[in-house]
């Protein structure tokens, strides 16, 4: 559901707002949830006087250091007590829902919040009900729509997300921010939009999220290195990625491959590419904001619907994780031919995500807590 955003005539409030984020990252679940929460936290902090605290489990391969580097307070929760099964979202907490909410309440003892933001596939209305007494408002970030939420604000940045998706999962008073107009992107993606459209060098970007647990980066590199079309191949990986050393070894053996480990200028690097190979998820909106078409590898069933919608919009071509050897080069060559003939692809991308979503969401957050 897209809503009209009106500029507020009120001045930035002077009183301090206390906001808590409950979100996790790990080697197997990736860093996307933390990164989009950081983006929202940064946008809010630029618009108001806020004190923001992140509550995150100390899981192996987490991105908690990014929170500290961004200038926000981090309170580490205990490491996961149980194994995380990627196909079983309820296991993503690494603890029972009751234990997680109880630990959260213990860590926040004596504190009250204007807003608690939850971005976690394992948390639902039961967790919300247990902590609601310490906060005035609650916000959920989701895209699965597979559980109920007791919240005042819900964000799903999925392209063409329909209202009916959450009709029976939220309260009557819940405000819905739905669609890629609300995609949480850092401001630099707006800054480098023009550069991206004017790019000239034939550069390929390979980026499968921060941790790339399936080592898709190396699989893709081994195939595309045979193509003579690209003058340069940029690869982005987080320093916590378990296969970062093997990718570095590959890059050192091929002059046109450049590995960027945990770079601070991701938008700038992405803006120089003419085509990307990557994952579904948050990076879809980053690519669109920069006018960057892509070949997307679908790694989970819940990604297939959005991948299909973006393919129909002619901004990506997608294949499954089992089709890389058979189809990746064919899809890359499809884009090579398409981009030679038609530059409208860049406009198609930006029409899906203009890069201003973080500003819109931050405005709506401040409205409900003011």
Image (cartoon, helix red, strand yellow):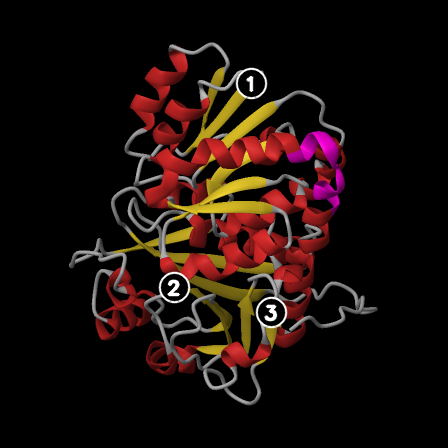
Residue 6: percent from the left, percent from the top?
80, 69
Q: Secondary structure at mark 1?
A: strand
Q: Secondary structure at mark 2?
A: loop
Against 22, is 99 above or below? below
* Residue 264 appears in view: no
- Dominant SS type (magenta): helix
Q: Which residue is mark 2?
A: 120
For residue 228, side relative to residue 362 (left or right): left
Quadrant position of the C terminus in the picture = bottom right
Name the N-terminal-most of marks 1 and 2: 2
Separation of residues labelled 1 and 3 (CA atoms):
37 Å
Residue drawn at the location 80% of the way across and 66% of the way down: 7
Against 156, is 236 above or below? above
Residue 336: percent from the left, percent from the top?
61, 30
Name the N-terminal-most of marks 1 and 3: 3
Of all residues, the one furthest to the right in this rendering is: 9
Quadrant position of the N terminus in the picture = bottom right
Q: Nearer the viewer, residue 145 or 26?
A: 145
For residue 181, side relative to residue 88 (left or right): right
Give the magenta range: 338-347
Residue 151 in magenta stretch: no
Q: Which residue is mark 1?
A: 232
Q: Which residue is mark 3?
A: 178
């Amino acid at each position: 559901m897209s809503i009209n955003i009106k500029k507020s005539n009120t001045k930035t409030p002077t009183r301090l707002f206390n906001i808590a984020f409950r979100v996790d990252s790990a080697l197997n679940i990736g860093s996307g949830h933390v990164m989009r929460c950081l983006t929202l936290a940064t946008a809010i902090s630029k618009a108001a006087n806020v004190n923001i605290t992140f509550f995150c489990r100390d899981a192996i391969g987490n991105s908690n250091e990014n929170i500290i580097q961004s200038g926000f307070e981090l309170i580490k929760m205990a490491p996961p007590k149980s194994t995380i099964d990627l196909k079983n979202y309820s296991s993503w907490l690494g603890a029972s829902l009751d234990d997680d909410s109880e630990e959260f309440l213990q860590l926040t003892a004596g504190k009250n919040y204007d807003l608690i933001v939850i971005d976690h596939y394992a948390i639902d209305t039961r967790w919300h009900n247990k902590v609601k007494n310490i906060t005035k408002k609650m916000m959920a970030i989701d895209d699965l729509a597979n559980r109920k939420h007791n919240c005042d604000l819900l964000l799903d940045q999925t392209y063409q997300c329909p209202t009916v998706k959450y009709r029976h999962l939220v309260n009557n008073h819940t405000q819905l921010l739905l669609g890629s107009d609300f995609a949480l992107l850092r401001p630099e993606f707006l800054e480098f939009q023009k550069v991206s459209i004017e790019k000239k060098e034939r550069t390929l970007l390979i980026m499968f999220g921060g941790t790339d647990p399936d080592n898709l980066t190396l699989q893709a590199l081994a195939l595309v290195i045979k193509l003579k079309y690209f003058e340069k191949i940029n690869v982005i990986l987080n320093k916590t990625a378990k296969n970062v050393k093997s990718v570095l070894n590959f890059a050192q053996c091929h002059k046109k491959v450049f590995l960027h480990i945990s770079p601070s200028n991701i938008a700038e690097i992405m803006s120089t590419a003419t085509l990307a190979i990557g994952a579904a998820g948050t990076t879809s909106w980053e690519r669109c904001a920069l006018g960057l078409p892509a070949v997307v590898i679908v790694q989970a069933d819940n990604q297939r619907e959005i991948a299909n919608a973006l393919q129909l919009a002619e901004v990506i071509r997608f294949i499954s994780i089992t089709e890389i050897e058979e189809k990746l080069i064919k899809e890359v060559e499809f884009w090579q031919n398409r981009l030679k003939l038609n530059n409208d692809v860049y406009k198609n991308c930006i029409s899906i995500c203009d890069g201003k979503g973080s500003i819109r969401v931050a405005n709506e957050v401040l409205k409900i807590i003011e």
